[in-house]
Amino acid sequence: MSDVAFAVDLGGTNVRGAIVTRDGEIQHYRTARTAVRGGVYAIIDQIVGLAEDAFDEHGERPETGVGVVAPGPLEPKAGIVRFAPNLPGWENVPLKRLLEERLNIPVVLGNDGNCAALGESMFGAGRNVDNLIYLALGTGLGAGIIHQGQLIEGIAGLGGEVGHISVDGNGPRCTCGAVGCMEAYIGGWAIARHGELAAHSERSAMIREIAGEGRITAEVVADAALEGDRAAIDIFARGGRALAVGIGGLVNVFNPELIVIGGGLARAGDLIMEPFRSSLPNYCMLPAYQHVAIVPSALETNTGLYGAAANVFYQQPNEQTGM
């Protein structure tokens, strides 16, 4: 059938799978705790098991294919997971080939940010919008760019790594090795790191108090900010302004209609969004700014599944609808 795809989300602590229709209905949802200690082939077995179970219940195999979304870095066009931060031992895994050998149907691999942009475009806040930027504020800063209806992927499928645009040549070192990346200000790991520095330098007793004997996380820093802690508020404000610097440049380059904000850290709300919104006009041309709306994701916890399915439909458009 050309109207459904099987979607797999490898982005969390669980492997999640479901059949998704072209009109956005999720069917035959399946999930299993990711067998991270079992290595690559244990997780391959899980994906195949979830898929075959869903196919049996659905009554037939989705000939359109299987879409898999995973955190990067990936080479989607080659179907290779170069490194998966949440999957120990996953280095240079030819995931597309391994799954196609087991399932005997086409498999499409996609970066979580790029696929989320496609998902929002087909099923979510950006439905029928040809120009949008999707931002996932989470542990890192994922993103995807759709311009004139086309996903910006680059020569090897590595395009759209917005989080690693440098916004400060004298800024903090990012986990990617570069200096002053947006992610080094607004990624969840960066919020936590700046919170630790504030707590250990005596600038924030409240962050230390809320963390107690536990780790200082982005959530701890957010709780402190919501309680009025000045240092915590400043951490999020600095992150929001850094986001505005980088995204302002992209607004000038791509002139999008929408900026869609998703990811777990987006729940920090105005702590990030107020400084982002108020600063953005300072970093892009006024005419471009006047044409862009900033909206929340409409897909929430199912962003990965919708994105994986959207990637399949994007690669194999319906002859009648073009989608």
Image (spheres, helix red, strand yellow):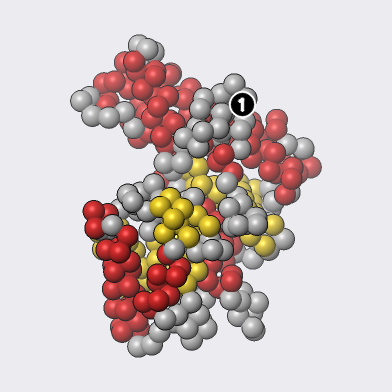
Q: Name the residue at 64% across, 48% down.
A: 293
Residue located farthest toward the top when viewing the structure as drawn: 202
Q: Name the residue at 52% across, 83% down.
A: 2
Of 102 and 273, which appears nearest the observer?
102
Residue 18 appearing in the image:
yes
Residue 13 in the image, given as x and y percentages of width and height: 30, 53
Please, what secondary structure does the residue beneath circle 1 have? Answer: loop
Residue 180 location, quadrant? top right
Residue 276 is left or right of residue 234, and the answer is right
Residue located farthest toward the left when viewing the structure as drawn: 213
**Position of 316 relative to 14 (above/below):** below
Of 93 and 162, which appears nearest the observer?
93
Residue 265 in the image, given as x and y percentages of width and height: 43, 41
Residue 270 appearing in the image:
no
Give the total of numbered labels.
1
Residue 42 is left or right of residue 166, and the answer is left
**Position of 45 relative to 144 (above/below):** below
Of 136 and 294, which appears nearest the observer?
136
Q: Quadrant where the C terminus lies? A: bottom right
Q: Name the residue at 40% across, 70% down.
A: 98
The type of residue carrying mark 1 is Asp
Residue 103 in the image, given as x and y percentages of width and height: 38, 78
Residue 211 in the image, given as x and y percentages of width and height: 27, 26
Residue located farthest toward the right when viewing the structure as drawn: 287
Residue 88 is left or right of residue 153, and the answer is left
Q: Name the residue at 51% across, 25% down.
A: 172
Instruction: Provide the residue designation for mark 1.
Output: 168
Crowding at dot 1, Cα within 10 Å, few <14 / some 14-19 / many 20+, comes out as some
